[in-house]
Image (tube, rainbow, N blue to C red):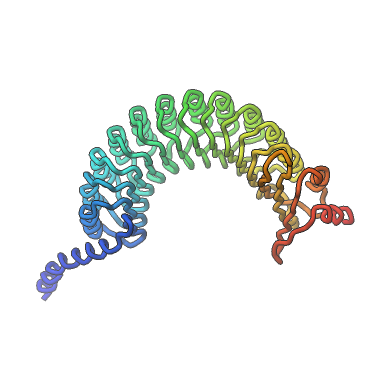
Amino acid sequence: MWKTIIFAMWLSLPALALNNVKKYTNLVTNGNLTLWGQHIDDNDAEAVAEVVEKCTSLKDLVLCDNQIRSRGAAFLARAIMHHPSLDSLYLSDNRLGPEGAQTLASAFITNASITVLCASFNRIGPEGARALADAVAQNQTLATLMLTGNAIGNAGAQSIGSALETNRTLTTLHLGDNKISHQGMAALCNSLKTNSSLRHLTLDLNLMDSSGAMIMADALKTNSALQNLSLNFNLIGSKGITAIAEALAFNQTLTTLFVMENGITCDGALSVAAALMTNSSLTTLALSNNKIGKRGAQALARSLSHNKTLKHFYFAGTQMGEQSAPYFIEALLENFALEAIKFAQNGFVSDRVRFIMRIETRNKTRAYYDRFILEILCCVGSTLPLELIAKIVDDYYIRVFLISPSGASTIDSRQLTEKNSSE
């Protein structure tokens, strides 16, 4: 009896595979096939691969959050090896492992169409990273490589660093959450001294310490390509950020720097403040969740009076205290470049109300435009920003939006000042 059942199941497999091919073919829309979180396993991946091979106009293939292992990767590798139009392949949150990564890498040696590969959270390890790095060294079309959360370690980072020394097409590289420490960071940073194509580098949630940051700073002094650098959730400390801040005196291409939650204290903030006095390339700076304190915050505020290029400044959770807020208000009244500041979680007590102050200029010599949006927690009964605002009420049209549980309402700044004085 059981033999009959197994034989019947065996006969039905081709029909099931054919049905899957038809189903996936029908899901192709405008050159896109998205099968996110559809429990795709290796058998399903074979059907998907057949669709990819037949659909020569396919541009984007999304297979994130599935159950594809090395065997499924082999089917996909065969399908993309010579595909004429596929531009992006998203495979994050599968189970490729080292073997699956190696199989995919072989396809990228010959593929000449894919510009984006996302293989994050696939447990590829250093072996898988090495295989992909070898492919990157030979590939001439891949522009974006995302390998977040793959435990590639120092060995994997060293392989990718070597590839960057010769590759001239990769512009975006994500290597966050990969347990990369000093040796791996050194290899990546050294490659930046000669690489002229990489524009965006993410190294969040690794093990970069102050010595790694110093090597990065040394690379930034000569690199003229990198524009966005993200080092959030590392261990660079004040010594590390000081080295990077000093490098900004030489670097004129970096526009975005994220160093949130890195153990940076007042000394590090003072170095950043000094750099902002002269740097003319940074447009976004994120220092949130560092123990910068009042003195460091006030130094940064003063630097904003001089800096004319920074547009976005993230400063949440830095222990600045509400005494530092007036320094920022005063600086921003002189700074016309800043568009947004985030001050949340900075020691303002819970019974304070939240204000969003939108300040717009009406200077007749220039066009009317939004000046900046400032989010700050302050007390209605304090003189925190209101005295400063009252001084410039003739030059600026100021609207204060009081955000309360009952909703938002507009309050004239003069009325609010009178209310503040009466209290």
Task: Name the quadrant containing residue 39.
Answer: bottom left
Query: Which residue lies most toward the front here?
Result: 364
Who is closer to the viewer here, 143 or 259?
Answer: 143
The location of residue 404, given as percent across then percent down, is 72, 62
In the picture shown, does residue 78 fall above or below 236? below
Q: Which corner quadrant holds the C terminus? A: bottom right
The location of residue 196, given as percent across then percent down, is 41, 28
Who is closer to the viewer here, 403 or 191?
Answer: 403
User: As drawn, is 131 to the left or to the right of 151?
Assistant: left
The location of residue 257, given as percent across then percent down, is 54, 37
Query: Which residue lies most toward the bottom here?
Result: 1
Is residue 294 something one can see in this rendering? no
In the picture shown, does residue 293 fall above or below 34? above
Who is closer to the viewer here, 289 or 411?
Answer: 411
Is residue 276 something one can see in this rendering? yes
Q: Which corner quadrant holds the N terminus? A: bottom left
